Structure formats: structure tokens, C-alpha cells
Image (cartoon, rainbow, N blue to C red):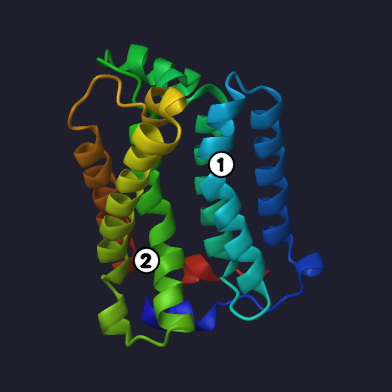
């Protein structure tokens, strides 16, 4: 796992990188569709504050520290899931309602899906940051994404509290999407941790050949 991360960082120009261009195109289409069809513009803006921050980070770092194509695809998938949640609010997301009916759940669980996906999909990009960008020893970096996922999840829950209870009280309930669950923050954090743990376990046993498509 450690060597394949070091070997497969993309160096192709943006205009010649099919995987990266496809990832950008898919995300932009999804993002625009969520803006055009949103049911709550104020909530959309709140939810996408972190999206703008993430995109700014990716643009700034592209010149000096590029991710592999696999990481860009995974990041794009996660951002698509996140911005789709902003279209209807997480608590009223149609996919969440479909899952609720399918599994006879007590609430709309789309927010749980996105928190789990945060750990599952962003573990590999975080691993690249530790190994390729920061130069951490592979053995040290191997489980770092799990710790970082826990930390980011906790900070995000604090941000949610501040936004909902201090800065934008009128949008608070829609933004939090707790749906009456007093343990919502803890469950969200655990699901992100679970996703990161599963992703780390998968990467430990993933053959190098799986990553051969990254720079094509």
C-alpha cells in the first residue's frame, strides 16, 4: 500500500488527464443541479460553505501537491454526495426517504450516509497527504486518516452547533438535521470513524494493480 501511493501521484497536465476532467465535469453538473433545484437557498449556501473551502484547497494545492487520479475521483464522489444533500436539506433528502421506506427506518438517514462516506471515501486522499506531501513514514501514516477523521468530525459538529445556535438560528434545525435525535452528533462522528476504519482495512489488502489506471 505504501509504495503504490508513492508511485501513482498524477503529473499529467489538467487538459490531458481524462480521469480528473471527468471528475470535475460530473461534480460541476451535480453542483449546478443542486443550486437550480434547491428548495432552500439559505440552507444551500450554509451547506456549501465547506464545499467552497474544499474546492479552494484543491485549486491552490494542484500546482505544488497533486493528488493521484484515484484520490480526485474519491473526493469528487464525496463532494457530489455532500452537495446533493444541500439541495433538499439533509433531513428531507429524497434518497434518504427512499432508504427509510426500503429498510423501514425511523428517520431520514441521508446525513448518516454522507458522514460514513466522509471516512470511507477520503481516507485514501488523506493517506496521500501524509505520505506524499508531509513525508510521514508509511507505518506512521497508515492509520493517521482514522485519527484525522475523528478530529475533523468532532470539529465539524462544533461548527454545526455554532452555525445553528449562534450565527444562523433561523436555519438551525434545517442545517443540523438532527430530526429529534439527541445523539445525532455522536452517531455521525462514529459513522465517519467506521468508514475510515473500513477504508484503511481495505487499503491494507488492496493489490497494487488496482491503482494502475490512476495516471491514464
Vertical relation: 8 (above or below) 95: below
Mark 2 surroundings: few (<14), some (14-19) or many (≥20) residues within 10 A: few
Q: Residue at x 34, y 33 (%)?
A: 165
Q: Which quadrant of the figure has residue 113?
A: top left
Q: Nearer the viewer, residue 189 or 103?
A: 189
Q: Residue at x 40, y 77 (%)?
A: 130
Q: Nearer the viewer, residue 147 or 155?
A: 155
Residue occupied by mark 1: 48
Q: Which quadrant of the figure has residue 115?
A: top left
Alpha-carbon distance for marks 1 and 2? 33 Å
Q: Secondary structure at mark 2?
A: loop
On the rendered image, what quadrant is the C terminus found in?
A: bottom right
Mark 1 surroundings: few (<14), some (14-19) or many (≥20) residues within 10 A: some
Q: Nearer the viewer, mark 1 or mark 2?
A: 1
Q: Secondary structure at mark 1?
A: loop
Vertical relation: 7 (above or below) 103: below
Q: Nearer the viewer, residue 150 or 77?
A: 150
Determine if residue 93 is in view: yes
On the rendered image, what quadrant is the N terminus found in?
A: bottom left
- The earlier-in-sequence mark between 1 and 2 is 1
**Where residue 54 sits in the image (x, y, percent)?**
55, 56
Q: Residue at x 32, y 66 (%)?
A: 145
Vertical relation: 193 (above or below) 97: below
Residue occupied by mark 2: 206
Q: Residue at x 31, y 64 (%)?
A: 148
**Where residue 188 sits in the image (x, y, percent)?**
27, 40
Looking at the image, residue 115 sits to the left or right of residue 74; the answer is left
Amino acid at each position: 500500500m505504501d509504495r503504490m501511493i508513492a508511485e501513482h501521484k498524477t503529473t499529467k497536465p489538467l487538459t490531458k488527464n481524462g480521469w480528473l476532467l471527468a471528475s470535475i465535469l460530473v461534480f460541476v453538473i451535480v453542483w449546478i443541479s443542486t443550486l437550480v433545484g434547491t428548495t432552500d437557498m439559505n440552507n444551500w449556501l450554509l451547506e456549501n460553505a465547506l464545499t467552497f473551502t474544499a474546492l479552494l484547497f484543491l485549486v491552490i494545492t494542484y500546482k505544488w501537491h497533486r493528488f493521484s487520479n484515484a484520490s480526485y475521483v474519491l473526493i469528487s464522489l464525496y463532494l457530489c454526495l455532500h452537495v446533493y444533500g444541500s439541495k433538499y436539506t439533509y433531513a428531507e433528502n429524497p434518497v434518504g426517504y427512499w432508504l427509510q421506506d426500503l429498510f423501514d427506518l425511523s428517520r431520514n438517514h441521508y446525513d448518516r450516509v454522507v458522514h460514513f462516506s466522509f471516512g470511507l471515501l477520503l481516507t485514501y486522499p488523506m493517506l496521500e497527504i501524509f505520505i506524499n506531501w508531509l513525508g510521514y513514514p508509511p507505518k506512521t501514516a497508515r492509520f493517521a486518516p482514522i485519527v484525522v477523521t475523528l478530529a475533523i468530525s468532532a470539529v465539524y459538529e462544533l461548527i454545526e452547533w455554532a452555525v445553528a445556535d449562534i450565527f444562523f438560528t433561523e436555519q438551525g434545525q434545517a442545517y443540523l438535521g438532527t430530526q429529534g435525535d439527541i445523539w445525532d452528533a455522536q452517531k455521525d462522528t462514529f459513522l465517519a470513524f467506521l468508514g475510515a476504519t473500513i477504508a484503511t482495512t481495505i487499503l491494507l489488502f488492496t493489490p497494487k494493480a488496482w491503482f494502475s489506471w490512476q495516471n491514464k
